[in-house]
Every structure is written in structure tokens, then in C-alpha cells.
Image: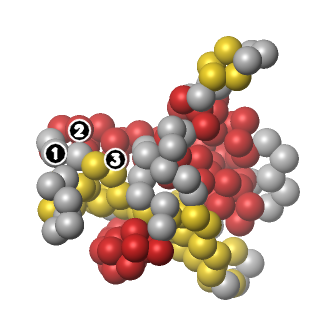
Amino acid sequence: MSTAASRPTSAPDDARMSQSSGPAPTGSLGLLRRLAGCTSRRAAYAAGLAYIADTFNSPYAALTLNVDNHSAVERAAVSDAATQSWSRHCDGMMLNVRYREHSQARFFQASHVSETFAVLAVPLTTIRDGTIGAMSVVVACRHRDVATARLSELQSLATVIDLQAN
């Protein structure tokens, strides 16, 4: 089963100010708040993917997940055009990192804009089940060191999702 969610291109929820409580939390705390109330592993990963796409200001993010002997695919995209542009790259990288069990970043030059993007991909693992899937996120990025830092951040957030999903 596959679900796709379109999301607005405005600032991420965590960057918006709340009138009553000040700025919303970012990083792991913001993710933990987003995961609160998720009643299944799949729901936690779907909520986590949406949070990561927002936080990374990603035009496209996806994950594949094996849950209870069923394969699930979740996607978050700003538009159908983003899905068409990035799904092939992300799907290939997710397959690669899932079976190699090693995170990866690749750079791409978008043909329709003068922007360089990195596709980041991490395996999704649990202590009990080993590798259960993969996640990929497209980010605007020109420098390898920034991509490496964002990849580390993605790995950390994926670990938080796993710990909360079990």
C-alpha cells in the first residue's frame, strides 16, 4: 500500500511561532511531539517522515517499510512534479542502502532550476528485527560537508522514530 501526501511549500511547522507557547521545538524534541499518539509502527514512521520532510524543507521524501510481513511505502511531496522528478532517484537509493545497510548521499543538478540537490538515504533498523526498510530525503545542498551533516541528522532522527515506534 502506498500513500502520498502533498505538503505546502511554506515554512516548516517547527519554524512557525505559536502565540501562546513561543517557538515550536525542533530536532528530536519536535519529532517526539509529532510522534506522540502514534499507535502503530507504520503510523510513527509516516508521522516521522512528514516531520523530516518539513524540517529539511524537502521537496520530496519517501520511505519503504516492512511491517507485519507487509510492505508499506510512504511519500511526502510538495507537488506531483516533485514526485515525478525525485521518486526514481530516491527509490533506487533506498533499495541500495537497505541491502547494503549503509547510509548514502548523492548530488544531483536539477535541470529546471539552478540548484544543486542531495538525495540522502538511510536504512531503517530495529534492535529486534534488523533492517526493516529505508528512508530518503531530497535537500537543497551545494557542499559535501553540509550533506554529510544532514545525513547524520537524518540517521539520528530515524533512530528516534524507531525507538518511539516500538
Image location of residue 128, percent across then percent down: 65, 61
Q: Quadrant of residue 74?
A: bottom right
Pointer 3: what residue? 151
Q: Nearer the viewer, residue 112 or 104?
A: 112
Residue at image x 33%, y 51%?
139
* Circle 3 or circle 1, nearest the eye: 1
The amino acid on which the numbered mark 2 sits, given as a three-letter code, is: Val
Kindly check if marks 1 and 2 are in contact, taking CB atoms under 8 A apart as contact.
yes
Q: Quadrant where the C terminus lies?
A: bottom right
Compared to residue 29, the image places residue 64 above or below, namely below
Which residue position holds label 1?
A: 142
In three-dimensional space, the C-alpha distance between marks 2 and 3, rounded to whole angstroms, equals: 9 Å
Q: Name the residue tied to disc 2.
A: 146
Residue 10 percent coordinates (x, y): 51, 43
Q: Secondary structure at mark 2?
A: helix
Q: Nearer the viewer, residue 69 or 31?
A: 31
How would you rate the neighbour count of disc 1 (Cα within 10 Å): few for under 14, some for 14-19, many for 20 or more? some
